[in-house]
Image (cartoon, rainbow, N blue to C red):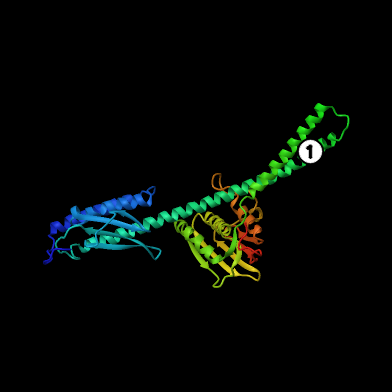
Amino acid sequence: MQMRGKRRPLSQQESLHERVKELTCLYGVSQLVEQHDLTVEVLLNGIAELLPTAWRYPDVASARISFDRRVLGSAKLDRRWQRQREPICIAGARRGHVEVAYREPRPLLDEGPFLVEERKLLQTVARQVALAIERREADAASAVLQEQLRHADRLATIGQLSAGVAHELNEPLSAVLGFAQLLQTETDLRQQARRDLSKIVDAALFAREIVKKLMLFARQTPPQKTHIDLNQIVQKGMSFLEARCARENITVQRHLARRIKPIWADASQILQVLVNLVVNSIQAMPQGGALTIRTRNTEHGVCLVVEDTGIGMSNEVRDRAFLPFFTTKDVGRGTGLGLSVVHGIVEAHGGQIKVDSSSGIGSRFEVELPQQRPPRGGRGSR
């Protein structure tokens, strides 16, 4: 309900006082938004507490922010109370709203008991809330991608070490085991020597089993293959990376095939391929540049192209680009595993990767992936 009667215009002093309250509220909201360590719940609760202080009648004002079925601030607003409400829209989707209501009737102003300036303030706050949440969600998604990359790097490291251990230990272990078993066939061995040989054989078998388990651990995450759309992988990956490109003064162009063939592949691993290649391109353009991503159909599958205008590679560097631990970056700037991880994933999917690069001109990575078919009797592979 609201009090009936004619609208009483505010005096100049009253208007000035209201503007000061609104600016103070906006400053408080901005301070909260800049605290990136706050959870979404704490952030929205803090904003909901600030809002009533900016309205004409703060003593009877309540504020609430609804977001993704969560309600922050005043848990319940009576439907009979007059209110102002603005939607929270993120990426074109309505995810909630911000609202302020009066618990008691108040004199008429511009919009019932509310001022036009209060509506504008509410719109600004709703936009700030949307931007803050969008940034936090992007950071969370980026953290997930970074963890996936670190996981891939760890697996690549373990795989490389496992291969080295197997190569170096298998031969001497086989010799130790073979000679020990050969000695066990002697008939004139003392009982103590026979027991000692048995211990040697057991120890050698145990060591060989450790090598096998280490190799198994390096492959403990088998591909989870399904039918995937390469264009969707590109859209998803670039939604996380375009903000970084913008910060690095890198323009991004996408040229995606209209009707891309579905391929039988592990979506998360193909996403890692894209992310690793794009991050590699970003690091190759410290002064900014252009990044182009293309997809197209091929005779037997699909192709992903990542092209940059970065510093490029010499012939020597290009020939060693996919070797594990090889990097031209400064210490602490890279592990030298990013491109080797890409190479491993592509090969595991039966594909191939090519690189064309020239110093001072840029690099072009082309990944070809076969269409393949799912195994009979199952929709995915484990």
Q: Left or right? Give the position of 295 relative to 37.
A: right
Q: Left or right? Give the position of 65 relative to 271.
A: left
User: In x, y percent, where is residue 128?
Assistant: 33, 57
The image quadrant where one finds the N terminus is: bottom left
* Picture layout, residue 182 above or below residue 81: above
Identify the residue at image location x=84%, y=27%: 190
Q: Is residue 325 visible?
A: no
Q: Is residue 32 visible?
A: yes
Q: Left or right? Give the position of 92 relative to 164.
A: left
User: In x, y percent, where is residue 164?
Assistant: 69, 44
Q: Which residue is mark 1?
A: 177
The image quadrant where one finds the C terminus is: bottom right
Identify the residue at image location x=56%, y=65%: 230
Task: Please identify the residue farthest to the bottom as the structure is shown.
Answer: 259
Task: Work out whether residue 343 or residue 97 is closer to the camera in this orientation and state it.
Answer: 97
Count the marks: how many?
Answer: 1
Query: How many other residues sit within 10 Å of disc 1, few (<14), some (14-19) or many (≥20)?
Result: many
* Residue kind at label 1, given as amino acid type: Leu
Label 1 sits on a secondary structure element that is helix
User: In x, y percent, where is residue 51?
Assistant: 26, 54
Q: Left or right? Give the position of 55 relative to 44.
A: left
